[in-house]
Image (cartoon, rainbow, N blue to C red):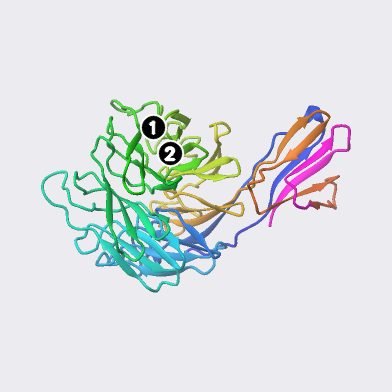
């Protein structure tokens, strides 16, 4: 089993401000740490985002558990943000409790709620609740059997894969199959297991195979389907919480024949996020190189724009410069978007990336390292299919493979916000986003040892005269 590494907290961003005609660009450095490596005995292949509550990270694994492949069908786990205190809260059996946990967890008080893709009374999936201490495990709902001919309809839906969003005591989720038309459903359910309601039945024209978590914002639910729509490669939609007013915001464009490229992307698998009146998301394939895109669209369906086209893959290891096939949503940190690509990068094992809200400034923050052998082991993990979460300047995520046992990892990435330098008349202003916490700005008049750094308390900007002495600034994480 992989040993836990302590989370390292270095000086996280360094910038030197000299004089007006020689203003350096802002630098952004990161520090990666492997927090936990998975093995047969504690669940394997984490594929979903984590949740953080009370200083503890909670997550799921798709398969494995105490009995490995024999009876282990996924697990719920917890681990501290420094990698200590790992504990398996529940190993699923693929019986009445469910099996294969592809989706993430939703927290309400001291209860965690999630979907199981299989298991339950008819083996078409369950919705479960479990206490943060591992107690009070409850099967809230079992999806009934499918019937009839293809596409095999039923009433509530089947095979729930995406995690839930919570409003009050109501969970909202998606089933990727079943429903009246057989193409999946949007549903709601109380946290006590009562009042299951089918809010929408997908028709293929408005989308099929919804697998990404919903976004609840402004009293509306926003989401995506991985296929279906006008060109059979996925859609974006919105609907009210009572199921009224379903609107297809966008259908991704036709890909044609191999290599299945288009202008906008295809098969969106990750959740959307909202910034103002703009939705941001990822498409796992399509685009100009058939390796996926990052996109933006207005909440009314107007103004769709691809912000980044992932570059093509090459060679036996299928490598590229930026990553490929993003399967998770984005997270807003400061004034930028952060995400993961499950493939590509220098070693073909995926990347963590950053870009500005307007699509500029794309950069790769981390590249998962090469596998050492046929078993696919390495130190840090591979193929990050789950999304990121941010807390105090640290991004947390999961990699579904790799690690010292080859079955995935939990990782952290310390990411400082960028320091910016701008001229205003005869002044030079050094600043960093006010929306970011967990960092302190420090200054020094010289870098000659011993360096004396002075903390500038409570300030996100410092103004210096152009004619004044040179000053050196850094952000430190606390």
Mark 1 closeness class: few <14, some 14–19, many ≥20 residues within 10 Å: many
The quadrant holding residue 124 is bottom left
Q: Is residue 283 above or below residue 406?
A: above
Residue at 43 percent across and 65 percent down: it is 77
Q: Secondary structure at mark 2?
A: strand
Q: Which residue is mark 2?
A: 282
Q: Are marks 2 and 1 in contact (CB under 8 Å)?
A: yes
Magenta residues, start to end? 456-478
In the image, 82: left or right of 404?
Answer: right
In the image, 383: left or right of 154?
Answer: right
Label 2, label 1: how far apart the Cα atoms are: 8 Å
Residue at 54 percent across and 67 percent down: it is 84
Per the rendering, the mark at residue 265 is: 1
Q: Secondary structure at mark 1?
A: loop
Per the rendering, the mark at residue 411 is: none
Q: Image quadrant for the C terminus?
A: bottom right
For the question of whether residue 41 can be seen, the reply is no
Horizontal and vertical percent for residue 445?
86, 45
For the question of whether residue 337 can be seen, the reply is yes
Residue most toward the left? 148
Horizontal and vertical percent for residue 12?
68, 49
- Which numbered disc, 2 or 1, marks the residue that appears first in the sequence? 1
Residue at 88 percent across and 32 percent down: it is 467
Residue at 83 percent across and 46 percent down: it is 447
Horizontal and vertical percent for residue 413?
57, 51
Of residue 459 and residue 243, the one placed in the foreground of this image is 243
């Amino acid at each position: 089993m992989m040993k836990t590494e302590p989370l390292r907290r270095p000086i996280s961003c360094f910038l030197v401000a000299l004089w007006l005609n020689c203003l350096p660009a802002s630098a952004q450095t990161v520090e990666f740490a492997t927090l936990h490596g998975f093995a047969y005995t504690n669940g394997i292949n984490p594929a979903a985002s984590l949740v953080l509550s009370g200083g503890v990270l909670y997550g799921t694994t798709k398969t494995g558990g105490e009995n490995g492949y024999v009876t282990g069908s996924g697990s719920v786990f917890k681990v501290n943000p420094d990698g200590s205190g790992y504990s398996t809260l529940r190993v699923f059996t693929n019986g009445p409790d469910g099996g294969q946990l592809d989706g993430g967890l939703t927290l309400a008080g001291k209860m965690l709620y999630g979907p199981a893709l299989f298991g339950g009374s008819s083996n078409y999936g369950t919705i479960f609740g479990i206490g943060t201490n591992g107690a009070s495990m409850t099967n809230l709902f079992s999806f009934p059997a499918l019937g009839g001919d293809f596409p095999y309809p039923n009433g509530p839906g089947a095979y729930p894969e995406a995690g839930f969003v919570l409003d009050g005591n109501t969970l909202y989720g998606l089933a990727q199959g079943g429903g009246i038309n057989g193409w999946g459903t949007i549903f709601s359910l109380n946290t006590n297991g009562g009042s299951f309601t089918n809010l929408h039945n997908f028709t293929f024209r408005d989308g099929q195979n919804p697998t990404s978590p919903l976004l609840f914002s402004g009293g509306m639910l926003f989401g995506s389907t991985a296929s279906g729509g006008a060109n059979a490669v996925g859609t974006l939609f919105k609907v009210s919480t009572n199921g009224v007013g379903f609107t297809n915001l966008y259908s991704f464009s036709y890909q044609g024949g191999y290599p299945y490229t288009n202008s906008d992307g295809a098969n969106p698998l990750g959740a959307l996020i909202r910034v103002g009146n703009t939705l941001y998301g990822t498409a796992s394939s399509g685009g100009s190189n058939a390796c996926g895109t990052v996109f933006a669209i207005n909440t009314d369906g107007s103004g769709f724009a691809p912000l980044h086209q992932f570059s093509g893959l090459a060679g036996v290891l299928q490598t590229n410069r930026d990553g490929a096939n993003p399967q998770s949503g984005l997270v807003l940190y400061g004034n930028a978007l952060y995400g993961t690509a499950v493939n590509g990068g220098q070693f073909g094992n995926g990347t963590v990336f950053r870009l500005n809200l307007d699509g500029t400034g794309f950069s790769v923050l981390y590249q998962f390292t090469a596998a050492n052998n046929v078993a696919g082991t390495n130190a840090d993990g591979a193929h990050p299919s789950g999304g990121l979460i941010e807390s105090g300047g640290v991004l947390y995520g999961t990699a579904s493979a790799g690690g010292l046992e080859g079955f995935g990892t939990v990782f952290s990435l310390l990411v400082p916000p960028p320091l910016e330098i701008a001229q205003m008349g005869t002044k030079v202003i050094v600043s960093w986003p006010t929306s970011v916490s967990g960092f302190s700005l420090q200054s020094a008049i010289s870098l000659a040892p011993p360096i004396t750094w002075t903390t500038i308390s409570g300030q996100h900007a410092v103004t210096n005269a152009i004619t004044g002495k040179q000053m050196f600034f850094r952000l430190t994480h606390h």
